[in-house]
Image (tube, rainbow, N blue to C red):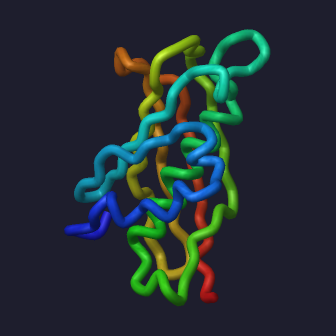
Amino acid sequence: MKAGFELANLQFIHNDSIVKHLGIEFTEAGEGYLIARMPVDARTHQPFGILHGGASVVLAESLGSVASYMMLPDPTKQQAVGLEINANHIRSVREGWVYGRVTPIHIGRTTHVWDIRITDEQGRLVCISRLTIAIITT
């Protein structure tokens, strides 16, 4: 992500959003990556008591969208919005936390493509996702 970007500047995303509802926390940003974590609990379970695949997709899209926002030349005149996402669910999780790490595949003027890897607390792969973001002018 942009050098010197402070995660504290992302507080606006926690206001009445699915990120807040699911308990997603952005924990680390560095050169070319962003990390967030999400609890695996009643908010994120499917009916059989394991992590809902849709919750993993929300974590993946949130990571990619925020990463794109962090790359915008002028976020007062641009927005980063999801265009396409896919996800492969590899392993189930019943409790604890999952951690998502997003890295860029392509950063263009009008589109960004991201790779998101979600792991459990033991570092085992839970989900792989690819997200395409459209950069629009407001």
In front here: 84 or 97?
Answer: 97
Q: Residue at x 59, y 15 (%)?
A: 92
Q: Judge whether 50 appears above or below 114 on screen.
A: above
**Where is the C terminus found, in terms of image quarters?**
bottom right
Q: Judge whether 31 appears above or below 2 on screen.
A: above
Q: For residue 7, what is the image quadrant?
A: bottom left
In front here: 76 or 61?
Answer: 76
Residue 94 location (% of width, % of height): 58, 11
Q: Residue at x 53, y 89 (%)?
A: 77
Residue at the right extreme? 47
Q: For residue 42, what is the image quadrant?
A: top right
In front here: 35 or 17?
Answer: 17
**Where is the N terminus found, in terms of image quarters?**
bottom left
Q: Residue at x 52, y 60 (%)?
A: 13
Q: Is residue 16 left or right of residue 108?
A: right
Q: Judge whether 113 appears above or below 77 on screen.
A: above
Residue 127 location (% of width, % of height): 55, 30
Residue 65 location (% of width, % of height): 54, 60
